[in-house]
Amino acid sequence: MTTRLALTAATLFTAVTTVHAEGIAVVAPQSGPYAVLGEQIRDGAAAAAAAVGKNIFLINESCEPGSSEDIATRIIEAGVDVAIGFLCSESLDGGLPALAEAKIPAITVSVRWKGLMEDALKHGWPFFRLAPAPEDEAEKLIDVILATWPGAPFALVEDGTIRGRELVDAVRAGLEERGLKPVFVDTFRPGQEQQIALVRRLQKAGATHVLVGGDRNDVATIARDAATESVPLTIIGGDAMRAVDQPVPLADGVLAVTLPDYANEPTAAKAVEALRAVGVEPEGYVLPAHAAVEIALAAAAIAAEEKRPIAEVLAGERFPAAIGTIGFGSDHELADNPYRLLEWRGGAFTTPAPQGQ
């Protein structure tokens, strides 16, 4: 189903009949298990379009295998300049060739599948990723450890899951390439009520700093038990730290390399105000989708003025948006790593003091 949305500041969603016209297609689930995330994408996109009096065209995303070609057909039939959204890789993998032929770039706010981008670059498909690249998290952790733990005896521990192990292995390889080796490497059992044995192993190894490849509650448990055992540990986790702060609350001072809360960014203030004025909370994919529409509209305008392909503009310019100034590299990934070093303090992740980077 393809729906054209005429947007105003007063009514974000007024559906009318589909017509061929310039605009932005917004591909997002409208029902099913991902409907809430789809609503976030639609809300953010609608607000960005409404702010400049533009139209968006809603296209349902089922996230089912084999659905991408139909989605691509509906995008092309809508006559849009750019398509954004794409919560699921199943909505892209078979449809990108058709979008490339129609010269319609696709910007995903979610899909992190490395192989899809490799195929896109190999075949010249106009696919751009507003979500982090698969290696961004590990690369940021490597940078942080090199910059903030010089000379410190550090440990790398992971929870035995594929995600935890792959993250820690990538960080370890990157650090060892730069001549930095941990004093202790271990796998712990996740989901335990206490991690005192692990804390004591870290103490025995002489580690004062530790990267934990595990979920938020395991990190919180390790931090709590370290304090109980009077073992001074500087602890850092990855993007899995963006989770509910329970059942064990996270201690102040725990670090994380994760995405920021874009709603608190100065660049998002105007968008946040407009969203909340119509009862939309700027959470999840709301602001990334808002930014995707801002980027798409700006790129289309530049392309029309300079008579250049939109994909070329996307790959060569930087665009002010709600989540900051965004640019894509020649690899169609974000030019700037979106992950940041943050510190848990007073019930929220905040920018750490200068000495913590």
Image (cartoon, rainbow, N blue to C red):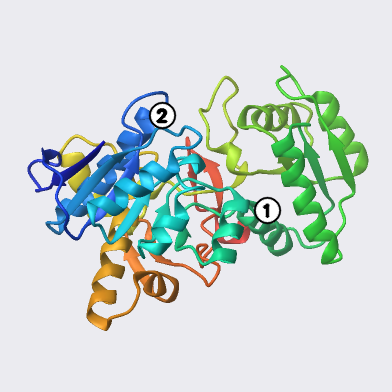
Give me the residue at 28% from left, 45% from top: 44
- Quadrant into which the C terminus falls: bottom right
Q: Total of numbered circles in the picture?
A: 2
Farthest residue in the bottom direction? 306
Secondary structure found at label 2: loop
Q: CA distance from mark 1 to mark 2?
A: 27 Å
Q: Is residue 237 left or right of residue 47?
A: right
Dot 2: few (<14), some (14–19), or many (≥20) neighbours within 10 Å? some
Please determine whether, in this image, residue 349 is positioned above or below residue 139. above
Farthest residue in the right direction? 204
Residue 264 visible? The answer is no
- Residue 75, position as x, y percentages in the image: 31, 50
The answer to the question of whether label 1 and label 2 lie on touching residues, with beta carbons closer than 8 A, is no
Of the residues shown, which amino acid type is indicated by label 1?
Answer: Ala
- Residue 26, position as x, y percentages in the image: 30, 47
Quadrant of res 60: top left
Q: Earlier in the sequence, mark 1 or mark 2?
A: 2
- Residue 266, position as x, y percentages in the image: 32, 57
- Quadrant into which the N terminus falls: top left
- Residue 24, position as x, y percentages in the image: 26, 55
Residue under pointer 1:
138
- The dot on residue 34 is 2
Quadrant of res 308: bottom left
Of the residues shown, which amino acid type is indicated by label 2?
Answer: Tyr
Give me the residue at 31% from left, 69% from top: 299
Q: Is residue 348 left or right of residue 28?
A: right
Give me the residue at 80% from left, 46% from top: 208
Mark 1 vs mark 2: in front: 2
Q: Nearer the viewer, residue 2 or 11?
A: 2
Please determine whether, in this image, residue 345 is positioned above or below residue 220. below
